[in-house]
Amino acid sequence: MKREVSKEFGEFFKNRRKALGYTLRRFCMEKGLDPANISKLERGEMPPPQKREKLEEYAHHLKIKKGSTEWYEFFDLARIAQGKIPEELLQDSELVKRLPLLCRTARGERLSEQQLKELIKMVKGD
């Protein structure tokens, strides 16, 4: 499972790099990065960095605009690959209260009628 989520981050990274017209070697050479490590990162064999500063550096190299949809996706994929919930979600106390319900649903546990209504309400954003 961990490799799969690391692979999702890596695929996102690789797709952005390629969209910019870079080969792996040229990208790493111009940005001062180790091609072996970036290759492992892109293949999901190495997890994304944990330090925000390093992720921001990578985002800058990939020309991901701060605050854009891609910015949030990049950081969310990194957090998820680390087995963590994205920080912004943890700041919403109502959402945090509902996370156990979401987790039970994701595991396929049967929900009561009331729990199902709560989940639908949460997904709709009501």
Image (spheres, rainbow, N blue to C red):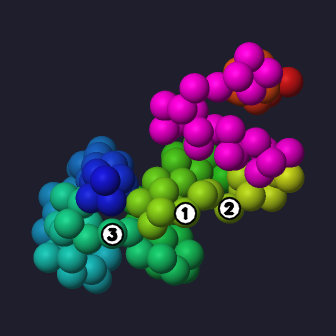
**Disc 3 residue type?**
Pro
Question: What separation in Å lies between label 1 and label 2 (alpha carbons)?
Answer: 8 Å
88 or 57, nearer to the observer = 88
Which labelled disc corresponds to residue 87?
Answer: 2
- Report the mark closest to the observer, 1 or 3: 1
Q: Residue at x 31, y 76 (%)?
A: 31
Spatial separation of the CA atoms under disc 3 and disc 2: 18 Å
Q: Residues within 10 Å of mark 1 (few under 14, many from 20)?
A: few
- State the CA–CA distance, disc 1 to disc 3: 13 Å
- Residue ID for mark 3: 47
Residue at screen point 48% across, 57% down: 80
Which residue position holds label 1? 84
Give the overall secondary structure of the magenta segment: helix
Q: Secondary structure at mark 1?
A: loop
Local packing at callout 2 (Cα closer than 10 Å; few below 14, some 14-19, many 20+) is: few
Using the image as rendered, state which of residue 16 and residue 114 is in the foreground: 114
Q: Quadrant of residue 105?
A: top right
**Which secondary structure lies at badge 2?**
helix
* 19 in relation to 50, above or below: above
Measured as percent of width and height from the top left, residue 18 is found at 24, 49
- Where residue 3 sits, quadrant-wise, is bottom left
For image coordinates 59% across by 43% down, the residue present is: 103
Crowding near pointer 3: few (<14 within 10 Å), some, many (20+)?
Answer: many
Q: Nearer the viewer, mark 1 or mark 2?
A: 1
Disc 3, SS: loop
Q: Please indicate, yes or no, whether residue 77 appears anywhere in the rendered image.
A: yes
> What segment carries the magenta color?
94-115
Image-based side of 27 in relation to 89, left or right: left
Labelled pair 1, 3 in contact (Cβ < 8 Å) = no
Q: Position of residue 11 (x, y in %)?
A: 28, 49
Which residue is rendered at x = 14% and y = 76% of the image? 36
Q: Tell me: residue 73, above or below residue 53.
A: above
